[in-house]
Structures are given as structure tokens and as C-alpha cells.
């Protein structure tokens, strides 16, 4: 009985922390103003709570920008849609050229959330969001679509 109480106590302590660790994507990223760009995958990690990807995109003046991102869809949903770890890793191996639908971080910079990925044939890959649309094609535009207003983020002084 003592072991069961210890396990129950541990769950009471750990479960709220795990639940609080997840975040709402619309808080961190501008998911209403998605933009597209062609990019080259540098690194892809199929992990919880969201897969991550580092990609390079080239601007019109030839400068290479490195971006860090997470995918909106989590691995459980990807697997149910047929995008297992092995299939996803193969589709997004380093050097692969893809078209991304990106929502830039509300803090700006070269960070964002990837809402949709297409291969060079225009097929939606590693995801389940085939109906996602973008407001602009910013392939080659330096810095992509950055936030217009530098409002305080939630949790910052003056933020909600």
C-alpha cells in the first residue's frame, strides 16, 4: 500500500507540471498571417510535444538565413496520418528542398511555426493540414514576414 501512495503522490506532483508545459501556438506565433518560402532542411527532430526543424532560406541578394521552427502537429497526430518517425525523417532529411507555410514568432526574428510543408512536386508532406493557405509568398524576401507592432508579449510587463 505504501508504494501505491508514493506513486499516486508522484503523479499528483508531476501531472500538473506536464499539462502546464504545453503552450498555445497562437500565443507564440502569428498563425493568422502565414507566408510561404522555399527552404532547405538542415535538421529535423521528430519529438514531443512538437517536432522541430532548422532550415535555411536564401534571400534575393544571396544571403542565407537560418531559421528555427516547430511544427504545429504533434507526433501522435502525424503517426495517425501515416507520418511515422521513419517516414517523416526520410521526407525531411538534411538537404531536402521544401516549400514551407510559416507563422513568424510574435517576438520576431528567424523563428516560427511551420503549419504546412510541400515537396517539390507540390504534395503536402509530414502533416495533416492540406487546406492551409498563406497571405503572401515571401520566397527570397529578407526576414520573411516580421511582426509590425512590437507589442508586449503575454507574461511581459504590459502584456496580458
Image: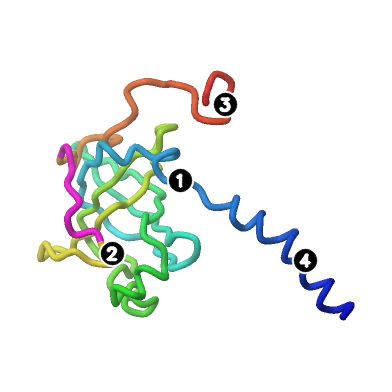
Residue under label 2: 127
- SS for callout 2: loop
- Measuring 44% from the left and 65% from the top, which residue is drawn there? 45
Give the mark nearest the N terminus, 4 or 3: 4
The residue carrying pointer 4 sits among few (fewer than 14), some (14 to 19) or many (20 or more) residues within 10 Å by Cα, namely few
Segment colored magenta: 129-136
Q: Based on the displayed image, in which of its 4 quarters is residue 64 positioned? A: top left
- Measuring 49% from the left and 23% from the top, which residue is drawn there? 152
Residue 22 locus on image (x, y percent): 53, 52
96 or 107: nearer the eye?
A: 107
Q: Which marked residue is nearer to the observer: mark 2 or mark 1?
A: 1
Give the mark nearest the N terminus, 1 or 4: 4
20 or 78: nearer the eye?
A: 20
The residue carrying pointer 3 sits among few (fewer than 14), some (14 to 19) or many (20 or more) residues within 10 Å by Cα, namely few
Q: How many marks?
A: 4
- Quadrant in the picture for the N terminus: bottom right
Q: Is residue 128 left or right of residue 54?
A: left
Q: Which marked residue is nearer to the observer: mark 1 or mark 3?
A: 1
- SS for callout 3: loop
Q: Which residue lies furthest to the right in this view?
A: 2
Q: Are marks 2 and 1 in contact (CB under 8 Å)?
A: no
Residue 144 locus on image (x, y percent): 27, 37
Magenta stretch encompasses residue 54: no
How far separated are the C-alphas under marks 3 and 2? Answer: 32 Å
- Measuring 59% from the left and 55% from the top, which residue is drawn there? 19
38 or 51: nearer the eye?
A: 51
Residue under label 1: 24
Residue under label 3: 156
Residue 107 locus on image (x, y percent): 44, 32
Residue 3 locus on image (x, y percent): 85, 79
Magenta stretch encompasses residue 135: yes
How far separated are the C-alphas under marks 1 and 4? Answer: 26 Å
Amino acid at each position: 500500500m505504501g508504494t501505491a501512495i508514493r506513486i499516486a503522490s508522484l503523479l499528483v506532483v508531476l501531472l500538473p507540471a506536464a499539462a502546464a508545459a504545453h503552450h498555445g501556438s497562437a500565443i507564440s506565433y502569428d498563425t493568422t498571417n502565414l507566408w510561404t518560402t522555399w527552404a532547405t532542411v538542415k535538421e529535423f527532430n521528430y519529438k514531443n510535444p512538437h517536432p522541430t526543424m532548422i532550415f535555411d532560406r536564401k534571400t534575393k541578394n544571396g544571403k542565407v538565413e537560418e531559421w528555427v521552427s516547430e511544427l504545429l502537429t504533434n507526433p501522435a497526430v502525424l503517426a495517425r496520418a501515416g507520418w511515422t518517425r521513419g517516414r517523416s525523417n526520410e521526407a525531411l532529411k538534411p538537404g531536402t528542398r521544401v516549400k514551407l507555410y510559416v507563422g513568424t514568432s510574435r517576438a520576431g526574428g528567424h523563428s516560427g511555426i511551420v503549419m504546412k510543408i510541400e515537396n517539390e512536386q507540390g504534395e503536402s508532406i509530414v502533416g495533416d493540414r492540406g487546406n492551409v493557405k498563406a497571405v503572401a509568398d515571401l520566397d527570397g524576401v529578407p526576414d520573411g514576414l516580421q511582426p509590425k507592432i512590437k507589442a508586449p508579449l503575454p507574461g511581459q510587463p504590459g502584456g496580458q
